[in-house]
């Protein structure tokens, strides 16, 4: 695969991306149906230092599973079966493959029908050892519905201190407590001293999410992953959380990956955007180009997503909302060819026959890639 | 774009005083539990008293050879034992004394009931307690291995062992164990001959038999495993793993303390019953033999004392459960 | 090496059954065979089709190990062990069902009462249940036997009653979980009459699982209690056979090397209870798996 | 005095034979002192003092720790104990006892060499007779009219009427009444009951929480200190485990070996077996109030229908003797020429047909013409270790079925069984054991006047000439005359069969070979324990 051209040079003096996911495949086996659920089917993504990448797509597109695979939190069987994840701890350090050695424990035979041989015990030991060192140090994560994500049996203070202790064990008890209060203050929680002794059920959803953010950032991760951070919160709290995240982005310059289905969130936070559909990346590129509705080239799915957002004008004239008809495909019954074909409204005139074959994620200019024959030349074309 | 000063959250304002410390929460739970136990004890002792009064037979037989006495002599004996007074009077007298800690004297040995209960009771408690701990420990270990699929072979073996041993009747298991370990291998001494070494050897066998063989092992293991699997899917466990925090620190309260304490409270009466059988086979001088003799002799004070003691043990089980669960789960206390 | 491969054809019910984890496969089939064997033994003994007359004594052939005449050997007065073991099923079959029935019915009633109307029923029912639980079982049964006849129905009735708290607690905690899921409130809000909600949603849909557990574990427990009591001499009395009193009589010959007399009935107890436990757990896991799949 | 017991327990006082013998002062048998003996008992003693103790385990312990005025020789002759010598008045009613010099109470609880005086002996009698003292001895000593102290060393006891074996009756154990909480009577709340002081060869050292009773040698014993240093009693709840404990050298002796284990212990060269014939016998009691059982032919038929020798051989390995009448074979009143009814099912059927049970019902059991079935319920008490009794009753049921009599077994809890049998007389047949001290006194068993509630004639048997014989036997003083009357009674009852008389079992004590010179008293067991010894090398 060609390396992405250095973009937004000013912000990223790095020679290469902080994180490069290459051809990641994460399958789940459904014994009742005897088939694989291909949640992530060959995803490749890059993230530059300090940059915020937004992964956008409907639920069931595999965006969350991609991140869970990165974090090593996928325990379902057979889990990660193929791919590499190059991670560069510091801008100038040599990249390390987080999935190095996967081949010894899980062999994937792609041919229809796909087969996986997995040494469960060995995989488990390797997987647990490999990732557990980096979680909470290099990578930190924030989750959806924060109140359930906080441990109901431990006070807020204990949970934040745990993250701080893991990062800097040398701190004294008082020092750690002060830092914890500092972080609570930074995420705009009132009276942090008293809050330390509260439990998750004493706080509101918004407050819990702030605690989650404080806890994640307290670990000073090099990469922060936010999985639908604002979903489920009501509008006002949602915008406060986004403001907070924007402020943190500016202040700490942490590389962030945001997973969301809400284009508004993506527009607010993202430098680059990747659109995922049916376990694959169908478009990725700088936020400006991807999000501009009328700018071509663009993947029909992205266009559908953008046009589904009602503008003020639409509301005024009470126009019917445009919808992408059809439904998200069943990931255990994916056929060959372009996955978006049934729902695609803009089939390339005269070249529909190409859609029988799945288009590659081809370069269409300025760091932008699209997986659609409307913009790519087919090998057989003259 | 600075966010206006800290957002006052409606929910936080409503609760003024700080969350009660675990210690105070446990204290409140124990007070509630003692009150409930007191009410229960009256009910239990009254029920047993009525049952005893209706049961045929008369303790006088322990004292004299009844068939040699004339009717008046027998009446004199009954009067001496206080059996001729009306039922309500006897109950009120008993409760009156019980409240002051005097459970009366055993009609058989003349020793105060409290001493008889204590001398035999602590052995039964020791046996039942350690057996209960063994059952819970085994169950927790097996459930953890099975739920986390860590060592499938060991987990499978322990699981099968749990199923087989808890289907074995404990009264037969006791004999089998004695036959194998003592008669054939001579490993365990059959009686404690005073020195500490043999005493512990003598103690280990009944605890093992009651701990593993009381018939609840497989049920407990399955209950713990189902509960643990549920907890492992909780969001906060995923957060804990994302934070790289040690899993057990986040898991132990909801995954172990809560289910184990409720299993302890539910299964304690059952293991206590099993202890009665094991005591007999292993010649363990516990409350079992006391109950046996007292029921046959209609030794009313001892029977009432035993009813009180076993009700207290069962309630103690519940108190431990309440205390543990309130200490672990802050939401329970409010 | 675990091996996962996609089936090209859609799985049939047999395919789905085969997909069950091996543990559950063995457990259910083992449990089913035990249940069948038990019912066959019970029916045969009821109809009197037994290999040898269970009460025929032969003082010359006491405590014999299994041979041609007596497939499982003879007991302490020379009676055939196999037919007595088959007859022994009568000791716990109906009484066991009675005990389970009692604990289930009353357990359900109390469970629903406390589950749905905690403010009104929690304390009165709670105190009653804990009263039942705190009574010392053994002393209670001793006195009941003294008062009435040592009849196994009465004894297992007492056992059933003392098991009500466990069943009630099981159902109450299940209702508490269901209520948090708020679809019960939704059904009530839609105007579905309360008893239908309780009947269909709680008792039928979710109750089945609990009934299953209580029935299998309950039967296992009923057998264990019946045999323990008969072993101690308080349950089923001679000449009616029960696995418990057969082990009890056999134990006295244990140390003299005649292990077999008590081992045969003990193994019968083992395999039967094992069958109930395995089947109960396996079916429960299927039920839970189906709910959460 | 008789006592109906469940089969695990047995009788009270023993048989006297009138004879004098010199009393030993110092131990001259030359046996070594030292060594410990640990013995096993099935069950625990209620109390440890001779007055309130009412179970065999307790009685054996009091034999070690206490002394009576007189005791018995290995040949069961009355010998001196606390009383050095005694004179009997011509009318056989007044007995003057001269106490042995130098008898002291055991040095326990603050007592040091306190001499035992006539006051203590008479004080003991006061305590026994006091209404507030609940003791089995009260009935036994109601025949004492009065007693007085002559001086510190001599006392006189007068009986209401002369009886044949008076001396044996006066072998109650003396207790130091001055240490009692209340000097005039002994309640079970008195600590003496669990912490006794006596004059016996061994004194209580401690009772452990587990129920062990540890007794050390009493250095000041008036017959010279016993050879053994310590005797410990360990209670067991399971007879099989007790035998295993002995086989594993955790016990040196078992008082009453489980019949099933006799063969195994006999084969083991480490142990000696000492048989002793408890004066008791086992029988099936038939309720004479029952319409079928009141006919003599039916009762006889039952006796003919069962093969007692086969039962004795297969269940007790033949260790016992069959009896034909209401006396234990060892007793002097047993009529040897009355043979037990033979096993003859044919004769049994004839008797039943003669008694009018000619019709055989559908179920194979006999009925009268009017269709009343010949069916009985056999009530048996539930006890923990009654496995042998179950064998006997099952086989009994089987034998009777062979001759067409239907028997249903009904097990009842022990106290409920006694209420059914002794108060409501709600039974057809029962199985039980009579245990005797004076084997000739069966008066209350068959006399028609003794059929009320809690009376010994619970079967309700009444036969005028049997009543006559009983009264005659009770009133004669002449032993020979009493023997012929009893033998006549034996003959009549052997025919009348109010009971189906079964057998008297031989009990066996198993003792480690290292314990030597073991003499056992058939009933009190430890009477000669002071002469037992353990060789130096084995201690």
Image (spheres, rainbow, N blue to C red):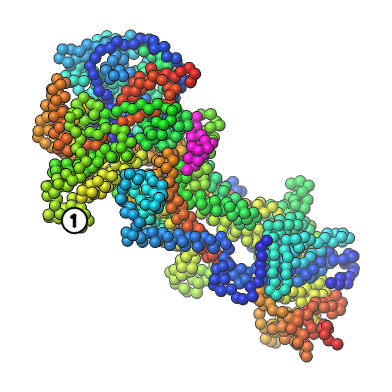
Q: Which chain contains the residue that carries disc 1?
A: D
Q: Is residue B192 magenta?
A: yes
Query: Residue at 87% of width from left, 60% of height from top?
Result: A94
Horizontal side of D419 relative to C193 (left or right) equals left
At horizontal 61% and vertical 52% (from top left) the residue drawn is B154
* Up/down of B298 relative to A37, above or below: above
Which residue is located at x 52 percent, y 43 percent? B208
* Residue C197 location (% of width, % of height): 46, 70
Q: Is residue D154 magenta?
A: no
Q: Position of residue D278 (x, y in %)?
A: 29, 29
The residue tagged 1 is: D361
Q: Nearer the viewer, residue B1 or D269?
A: D269
The span shown in magenta is B176-193
Q: Position of residue D523 (x, y in %)?
A: 30, 26
Residue D92, above or below B107: above
Left or right side of A97 for B39? left
In the image, A9 versus A234, the foreground residue is A9
State left or right for residue D99 relative to residue A174.
Answer: left
Residue B86 visible to an observer of this rendering? no
Hey, which quadrant is residue B227 in on the image?
Answer: bottom right
Which of the two residues, D84 or B54, is positioned nearer the viewer here?
A: D84
- Circle 1 packing at 10 Å, graded few (<14), some (14-19), many (20+), is some
**Which residue is at a point 20% across and 58% down the rendered structure image?**
D362
The residue tagged with tag 1: helix, strand or loop?
A: loop
Rendered view: D449 above or below C278: above
């Amino acid at each position: 695969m060609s390396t992405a051209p250095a973009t937004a040079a000013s912000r990223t003096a790095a020679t290469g991306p902080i994180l490069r996911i290459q051809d990641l495949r994460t399958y789940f086996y459904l014994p009742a149906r005897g088939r694989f659920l291909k949640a992530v089917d060959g995803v490749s993504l890059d993230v530059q230092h300090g940059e915020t990448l937004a992964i956008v797509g409907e639920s069931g597109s595999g965006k969350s599973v991609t991140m869970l695979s990165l974090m090593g939190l996928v325990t379902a069987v057979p889990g990660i079966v193929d791919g590499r994840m190059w991670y560069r701890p510091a801008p100038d350090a040599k990249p390390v493959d987080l999935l190095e050695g996967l081949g010894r424990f899980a062999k994937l035979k792609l041919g229809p029908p796909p087969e996986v041989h997995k040494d469960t015990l060995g995989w488990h030991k390797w997987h647990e050892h490999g990732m557990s060192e980096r979680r909470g140090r290099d990578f930190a994560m924030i989750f959806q519905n924060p109140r359930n994500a906080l441990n109901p049996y431990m006070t807020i203070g204990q949970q934040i201190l745990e993250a701080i202790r893991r990062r800097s064990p040398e701190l004294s008890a008082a020092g750690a407590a002060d830092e914890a209060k500092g972080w609570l203050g930074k995420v705009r929680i009132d009276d942090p001293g008293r809050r330390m002794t509260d439990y998750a059920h004493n706080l509101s959803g918004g407050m819990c999410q702030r605690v989650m953010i404080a806890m994640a950032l307290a670990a000073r991760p090099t990469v922060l992953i936010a999985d639908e951070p604002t979903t489920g919160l009501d509008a006002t709290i949602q915008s406060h959380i986004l403001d907070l995240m924007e402020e943190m982005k500016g202040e700490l310059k942490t590389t962030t990956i945001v997973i969301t289905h809400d284009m508004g969130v993506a527009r607010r936070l993202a430098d680059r955007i990747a659109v995922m559909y049916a376990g694959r990346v169908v478009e990725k590129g700088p936020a400006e180009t991807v999000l501009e509705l009328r700018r071509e080239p663009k993947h029909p799915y992205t266009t559908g997503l953008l046009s589904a957002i009602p503008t003020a004008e639409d509301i005024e004239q009470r126009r019917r909302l445009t919808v992408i008809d059809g439904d998200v495909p069943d990931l255990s019954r994916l056929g060959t060819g372009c996955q978006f074909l049934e729902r695609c409204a803009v089939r390339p005139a005269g070249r529909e026959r190409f859609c029988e074959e799945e288009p590659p994620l081809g370069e269409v200019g300025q760091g932008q890639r699209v997986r659609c024959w409307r913009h790519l030349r087919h090998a057989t074309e003259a | 774009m600075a966010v206006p000063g800290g957002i006052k959250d409606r929910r936080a304002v409503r609760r003024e005083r700080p969350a009660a410390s675990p210690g105070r929460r446990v204290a409140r739970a124990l007070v509630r539990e003692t009150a409930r136990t007191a009410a229960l004890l009256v009910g239990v002792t009254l029920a047993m008293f009525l049952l005893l009064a209706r049961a045929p037979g008369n303790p006088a037989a322990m004292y004299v050879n009844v068939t040699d006495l004339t009717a008046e002599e027998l009446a004199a004996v009954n009067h001496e034992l206080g059996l001729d007074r009306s039922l309500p009077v006897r109950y009120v007298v008993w409760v009156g004394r019980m409240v002051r800690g005097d459970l009366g004297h055993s009609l058989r040995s003349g020793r105060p009931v409290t001493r008889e209960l204590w001398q035999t009771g602590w052995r039964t408690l020791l046996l039942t307690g350690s057996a209960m701990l063994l059952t819970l420990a085994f169950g927790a270990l097996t459930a953890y291995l099975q739920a986390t699929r860590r060592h499938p072979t060991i987990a499978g073996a322990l699981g099968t062992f749990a199923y087989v041993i808890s289907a074995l009747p404990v009264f037969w298991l006791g004999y089998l164990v004695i036959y194998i370990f003592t008669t054939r291998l001579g490993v365990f001494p059959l009686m404690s001959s005073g020195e500490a070494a043999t005493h512990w050897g003598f103690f280990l066998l009944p605890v093992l038999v009651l701990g593993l063989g009381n018939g609840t092992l497989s049920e407990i293991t399955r209950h713990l495993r189902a509960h643990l699997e549920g907890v492992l899917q909780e969001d906060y466990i995923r957060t804990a793993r994302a934070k790289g925090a040690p899993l057990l620190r986040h898991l132990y309260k909801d995954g172990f303390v809560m289910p184990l304490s409720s299993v302890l409270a539910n299964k304690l009466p059952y293991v206590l019953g099993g202890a009665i059988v094991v005591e007999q086979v292993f010649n363990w001088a516990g409350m079992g033999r006391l109950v046996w003799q007292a029921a046959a002799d209609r030794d009313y004070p001892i029977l009432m004392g035993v009813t009180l003691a076993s009700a207290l043990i069962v309630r103690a089980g519940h108190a431990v459960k309440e205390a543990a669960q309130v200490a672990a789960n802050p939401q329970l206390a409010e | 090496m675990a091996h996962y491969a996609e089936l090209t054809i859609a799985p049939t019910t047999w395919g789905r059954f085969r997909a069950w984890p091996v543990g559950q496969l063995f457990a259910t089939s083992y449990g089913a065979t035990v249940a069948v064997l038990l019912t066959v033994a019970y029916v045969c003994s009821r109809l009197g089709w037994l290999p040898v007359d269970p009460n025929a004594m032969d003082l010359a052939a006491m405590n014999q190990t299994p041979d041609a005449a007596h497939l499982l050997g003879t007991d302490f007065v020379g009676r055939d062990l196999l037919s007595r073991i088959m007859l022994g099923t009568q000791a716990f079959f109906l009484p066991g069902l009675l005990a389970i029935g009692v604990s289930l019915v009353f357990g359900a009633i109390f469970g629903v009462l406390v589950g749905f109307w905690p403010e009104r029923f929690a304390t009165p029912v709670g105190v009653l249940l804990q009263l039942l639980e705190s009574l010392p079982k053994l002393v209670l049964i001793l006195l009941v036997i003294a008062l009435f006849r040592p009849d196994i129905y009465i004894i297992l009735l007492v056992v059933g009653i003392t098991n009500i708290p466990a069943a009630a607690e099981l159902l109450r905690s299940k209702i508490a979980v269901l209520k948090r899921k708020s679809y019960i409130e939704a059904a009530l809000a839609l105007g579905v009459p309360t008893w239908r909600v309780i009947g269909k949603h709680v008792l039928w849909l979710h109750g089945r699982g609990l009934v299953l557990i209580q029935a299998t574990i309950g039967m296992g427990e009923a057998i264990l209690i019946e045999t323990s009591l008969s072993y101690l001499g308080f349950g089923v009395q001679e000449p009616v056979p029960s696995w418990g009193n057969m082990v009890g009589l056999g134990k006295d010959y244990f140390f003299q090397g005649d292990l077999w007399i008590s081992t045969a009935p003990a193994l019968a107890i083992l395999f039967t209870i094992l069958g109930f436990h395995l089947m109960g757990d396996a079916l429960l896991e299927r039920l839970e798996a189906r709910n959460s799949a | 005095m008789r006592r109906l017991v469940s089969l695990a327990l047995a009788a009270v006082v023993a048989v006297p034979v009138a004879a004098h013998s010199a009393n030993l002062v110092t131990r001259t048998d030359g046996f070594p002192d030292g060594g410990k003996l640990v013995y096993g008992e099935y069950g625990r003693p209620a109390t440890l003092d001779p007055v309130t103790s009412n179970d065999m385990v307790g009685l054996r312990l009091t034999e070690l720790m206490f002394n009576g005025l007189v005791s018995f020789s290995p040949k069961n002759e009355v010998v001196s104990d606390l009383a050095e010598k005694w004179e009997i008045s011509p009318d056989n009613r007044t007995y003057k006892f001269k106490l042995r010099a130098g008898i002291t109470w055991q040095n326990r609880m603050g007592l040091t060499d306190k001499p035992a005086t006539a006051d203590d002996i008479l004080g003991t009698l006061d305590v026994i007779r006091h209404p507030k003292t609940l003791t089995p001895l009260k009935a036994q000593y109601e025949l004492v009219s009065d007693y007085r102290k002559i001086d510190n060393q001599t006392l006189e006891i007068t009986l209401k009427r002369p009886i044949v074996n008076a001396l044996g009756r006066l072998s109650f154990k003396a207790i130091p009444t001055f240490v009692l909480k209340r000097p005039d009577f002994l309640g079970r709340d008195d600590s003496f009951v669990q912490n006794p002081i006596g004059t016996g060869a061994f004194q209580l050292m401690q009772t452990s929480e587990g129920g062990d009773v540890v007794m050390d040698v009493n250095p000041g014993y008036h017959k010279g200190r016993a050879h053994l240093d310590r005797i410990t009693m360990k209670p067991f709840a399971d007879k099989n485990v007790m035998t295993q404990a002995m086989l594993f050298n955790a016990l040196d002796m078992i008082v009453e070996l489980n019949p099933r284990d006799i063969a195994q212990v006999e084969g083991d060269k480490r142990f000696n077996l000492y048989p002793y014939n408890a004066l008791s016998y086992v029988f099936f009691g038939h309720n004479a109030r029952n319409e079928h059982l009141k006919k003599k032919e039916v009762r006889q038929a039952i006796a003919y229908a069962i093969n007692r020798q086969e039962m004795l051989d297969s269940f007790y390995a033949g260790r016992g003797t069959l009896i034909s009448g209401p006396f234990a074979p060892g007793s002097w009143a047993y009529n040897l020429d009355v043979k037990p009814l033979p096993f003859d099912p044919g004769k049994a059927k004839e008797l039943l047909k003669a008694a009018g049970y000619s019709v055989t019902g559908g179920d194979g059991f006999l009925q009268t013409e009017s269709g009343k079935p010949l069916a009985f319920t056999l009530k048996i008490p539930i006890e923990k270790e009654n496995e042998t009794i179950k064998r006997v009753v099952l086989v009994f049921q089987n034998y009777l079925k062979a001759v067409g009599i239907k028997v249903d077994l009904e097990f009842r809890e022990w106290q409920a069984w006694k209420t059914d049998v002794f108060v409501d007389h709600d039974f057809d047949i029962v199985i039980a054991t009579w245990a005797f001290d004076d084997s000739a006194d069966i008066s209350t068993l068959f006399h028609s006047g003794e059929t009320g509630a809690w009376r010994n004639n619970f079967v309700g048997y009444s036969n005028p000439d049997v009543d006559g014989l009983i009264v005659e036997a009770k009133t004669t003083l002449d032993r020979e005359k009493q023997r012929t009357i009893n033998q006549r009674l034996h003959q009549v009852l052997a025919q009348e069969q109010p009971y189906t008389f079964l057998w008297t079992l031989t009990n066996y004590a198993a003792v480690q070979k290292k314990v030597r010179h073991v003499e056992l008293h058939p009933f009190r067991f430890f009477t000669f324990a002071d002469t037992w010894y353990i060789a130096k090398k084995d201690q």
